[in-house]
Image: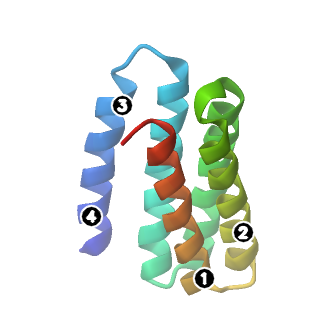
Amino acid sequence: MKLKSITVLMAAIALGLSSQANATEHHTAQALEHSAMATAHGQDGHADQLLKHAEEGLKHAEAAEKEHAEAHVHMTEAVKHLKEAIAHAKKGHADVGTQHTEEAMTHMRQSIGQ
């Protein structure tokens, strides 16, 4: 149930962000969406799904990081936290991985002024 609520919320946020013309926001929206999915799966104890979504989120966060000059510091922090989430998910540590995906999302939002 929690997963569905978060999915709907993040899809709405992603849709709003992706409607902007800038590719950077698109990557940030995708990174946020996948990070939210990773968080939801981590909260449910699904390390394998946390890993899958954190890896996909990382791809988009790294792309946004390259394009996001003015917010580079926050995206760099988001990338670090997603890498930590991936490392912990591989070890089966859903709780710690979840904390890192949440931190990553905080930095992603700060990078776009939300």
If the image is split into quadrants, where does the C terminus sit? top left
- Residue 101 visible somewhere in the drawing: yes
Do residues under tags 1 and 4 come within 8 Å of each other at their CB atoms? Answer: no
Say which label, 2 or 1, has the lower sequence index: 2
Do residues under tags 2 and 1 come within 8 Å of each other at their CB atoms? Answer: yes
On residue 96, which mark appears?
1
Q: Which residue is mark 4?
A: 4
> Closer to the observer: label 4 or label 2?
2
If the image is split into quadrants, where does the N terminus sit? bottom left
Q: What's the residue at 66%, 36% (across, down)?
A: 72
Q: CA distance from mark 4 to mark 2?
A: 25 Å
* Mark 3 element type: helix
Which of the pair 58/51 is nearer the observer? 58
On residue 17, which mark appears?
3
Do residues under tags 2 and 3 come within 8 Å of each other at their CB atoms? Answer: no
Say which label, 1 or 4, has the lower sequence index: 4
Residue 36 location, quadrant: bottom left
Q: Which residue is mark 2?
A: 84
Say which label, 4 or 3, has the lower sequence index: 4
Say which label, 1 or 3, has the lower sequence index: 3
- Residue 70 is situated, as x and y percent measured from the top left of the image, at 60, 28
Q: What's the residue at 46%, 72% (across, down)?
A: 41
17 with respect to 5 (left or right): right
